Image (spheres, helix red, strand yellow):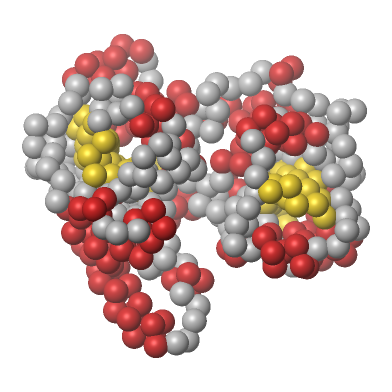
Amino acid sequence: MKDSERNRILKDYRKVAVIHDWLTGMRGGEVVLESILRLFPGAELFTLLHLEASCSDLIENRPIHTSFIQRFPWKARLYRHYLPFFPTAIEEFDFHGFDLVISSSHCVAKGVIVPPDVPHISFVHSPMRYVWDMYRQYFPGKGLLQKLIIPFFANYLRTWDAASAPRVDDYLSNSAFVGKRIRRFYGRSATVVHPPCLSEAPAARSIPDPEGQQREDFYLVLSALVPYKRIDLAVQAFNESGRRLLIAGKGPEEKRLQSMAAGNIEFLGHVDRAGIMDLYSQARGLIFPGVEDFGIVPVEAQAAGCPVIALGRGGALETVVSGKTGLFFYEESAAALNRTLDRREGIRFKAADFARNVARFTEKAFQDGILESIHRASKPGQGRKT
């Protein structure tokens, strides 16, 4: 986007509301939120609930409006249990007087009610996983709660989620993988705008050599230790191969995974940002065995010259170039992962390939995508059904 067009749009929309589902910590969604707030430094922030000091200064220092969920007891620990109240809570915000509404949504944020003359664009990280395509994974039990109560509320949430879809003027998705789900569940098209993984595109000379002497003889997993990430698959594969694996991250699966792991697998727990960058620059490769909507970690790894060994499904197919910046395995098995690791040992990756690939995932590219969406949504006669 030309600077003149960029500046015109920013000048036209001075009173901006940004909606984010909840503010309870810094994850990939909050990285996206930060970039939106940098684009609109005067924007006001609306959210279901806010745990004070849980996010970055950039987020914490904005005017933050919360819903009645903020007054519920034990919200820091139990807020997800209040899910049936979320649609009502998000609909109670008043956006009269704003020029533009932008929602950053992985739950109900896209369902805000906006005055008809105010453009509403929605960046969707994912339709609600726990009531749509991953419902069985989130609620696998067979007790009374899973058989009667949860299905009732899940049906209500699916109905509301689909019914609120026309409230958005222009949909953005973080990947084509998510875009297909938006089309299936909401009946709407979405333009792919990749998240702002990098502040700027690195030059090839600044990327650590993928085959350099600084690379050590270990592979890396960097992930929350939760079931759908399939870290157990990586543990099984490395148990069988005897290769060295370092696992950085914490979560409810940690003890189970440790009990499975052989002596060649080391659990690092939480690792700070500087430590993560060191691991990227030293590892032989990043293991990415789960299905993700997008996945910022593989992009960060590639920016550090670290090849990605990923399951060939989901967002990884859009961020990794097979044979150039990583490799895919297509069967969810330890044997398939080990065969792919054998192939990796025979490839010499080049820093220039990594530099070309990750140049797609900069903050400027993301912000330009947001501004182009605003331009589409504000055209005369632009409707909310596409």
Q: Is residue 374 left or right of residue 272?
A: left
The one of 271 and 8 positioned closer to us in this rendering: 271
Q: Residue at x 58, y 26 (%)?
A: 359
Query: In the image, residue 324 lies at what x, y percent?
Result: 74, 37
**Residue 385, can we see it?**
no
Judged from this view, the residue extending furthest toward the front is 73
Q: Is residue 365 left or right of residue 311?
A: left
Query: In the image, residue 207 lies at what x, y percent?
Result: 72, 24
* Residue 160 sits above or below residue 44 on the image: below
Query: In the image, residue 41 lies at what x, y percent?
Result: 30, 21
The one of 335 and 191 positioned closer to us in this rendering: 335
Q: Quadrant of the N terminus?
A: top left
Q: Residue at x 46, y 74 (%)?
A: 139
Q: Residue at x 63, y 53 (%)?
A: 250
Examine the image and state in which quarter residue 212 appears. Answer: top right
Q: Is residue 90 left or right of residue 291?
A: left
Q: Residue at x 75, y 62 (%)?
A: 258
* Residue 362 sits above or below residue 317 on the image: above
* Residue 44 sits above or below residue 247 on the image: above
Examine the image and state in which quarter residue 217 appears. Answer: top right
**Residue 242, can we see it?**
yes
Query: In the image, residue 93 lies at what x, y percent?
Result: 16, 46
